[in-house]
Image (spheres, rainbow, N blue to C red):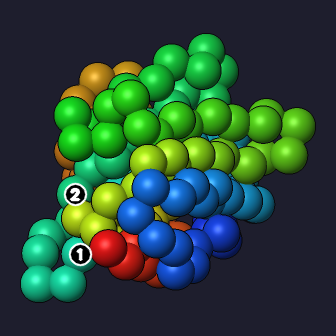
Amino acid sequence: QVQLVESGGGLVQAGDSLRLSCAASGRTFSSSTMGWFRQAPGKGREFVSAIRWSSGMTTYADSVQGRFTISRDNAKNTVYLQMNSLKPEDTAIYYCAGSPYGWGRMSDSQKYDTWGQGTQVTVSS
């Protein structure tokens, strides 16, 4: 089983940057793809970005395309989410997730079987 621990959240102002980290431990080989999702108060969980461990292939939600960058460090079993030009609407709990399935429809939360506890990101205007 894979364990995921997120870190790096915090309170920032609009236009600022943050970098989230997701450290994976345990049976990390069982997760071929890592994703980031977020959930704002009163809303459902929303896909943000995903990356494939082996190839580094990435995909993004339209709402963060061009502002957020996902990356991974295979040696450290860690995935990062660099968030630039943050907006108040980016305020949410950000979750890291692992998927054992092949690439495709990575925005579907049902493809992920392991989730972290989440880290709060708050962007003030």
Residue drawn at x 79%, y 34% as measured from the top left: 74
Residue at the disc numbered 2: 46
Of labels 1 and 2, the one closer to you: 1
Circle 2: residue type: Glu
**Disc nearer the start of the sequence (1/2):** 1
Residue at the disc numbered 1: 40
On the image, which quarter does residue 3 sit in?
bottom right
The quadrant of the image that shows the N terminus is bottom right
Residue drawn at x 57%, y 73% as measured from the top left: 9
The quadrant of the image that shows the C terminus is bottom left
Tell me, yes or no, whether the two marked residues, 1 and 2, touch with CB atoms within 8 Å.
Answer: yes
Considering depth in this image, is 54 or 122 the residue closer to the camera?
A: 122
How many angstroms separate mark 1 from mark 2 (CA)? 9 Å
96 to 50, vertically: above or below = below
Q: Judge left or right: residue 125 versus residue 43.
A: right
Helix, strand or loop under label 2 = strand
24 to 58, vertically: above or below = below
Q: Position of residue 55 (x, y in %)?
A: 61, 15
On the image, which quarter does residue 104 sit in?
top left
